[in-house]
Amino acid sequence: MKKRIKSFGYAGRGIRTVFDSEMNMKIHLVVTLLVIICGFFFKISLTEWLFCLLCFGLVLTAEMMNTAIENFVDLVSPQQHPLAGRAKDIAAGAVLISSIISAIIGLLIFIPKVWNFILAIL
């Protein structure tokens, strides 16, 4: 049981490390908080919240995996190597794809709500 509890501590340390050391993770967090605020403001549905939560998890997880891969590649290949560069580029591409898909989902959810809000003001 102690081993399992310690594993949560290690995971927490990993999450904290990424948030402390990676600027992109801080950007993802700010965007996540803005989406949460907009979600409450526009009273999005449960289904829309579920899609937002899945997107948050997808992007944050992809960013953490990218950081882990970059750190590992730097450890095993301190000198520049084409394969090391490819591994890092592919991991960064995964973050980009998850971010683009999440942004599209966010736009599909929020554009109609923003549009209706603007029309209600006018």
Image: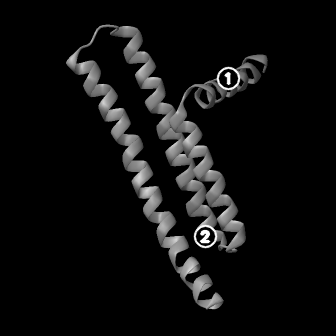
Relative image position of residue 122 (x, y in whole percent): 61, 91
Left or right: residue 81 versus residue 10 is left
Which of the colour schemes (rainbow, by chain, secondary structure, one colour) is used?
Answer: one colour
Residue at 54% over, 30% down: 22
Q: Using the rendered view, name the quadrant where residue 81 is placed.
A: top left
Residue at 60% over, 56% down: 53
Q: Residue furthest left?
A: 82
Residue 24 vertical placement versus 20 (above, below): below
> Residue 13 shows which numbered tag?
1
Q: Using the rendered view, name the quadrant where residue 2 is placed.
A: top right
Residue at 55% over, 43% down: 27
Residue highlighted by disc 2: 47
Give the amino acid type for the residue marked by disc 1 in the picture.
Answer: Arg
Relative image position of residue 48 (x, y in whole percent): 59, 69
Residue 55 vertical placement versus 14 (above, below): below
Depth order, front residue of 2/63: 63
Relative image position of residue 96 (x, y in whole percent): 38, 45
Q: Tag 2: Cα neighbours inside 10 Å, few (<14), some, or many (≥20)?
A: few
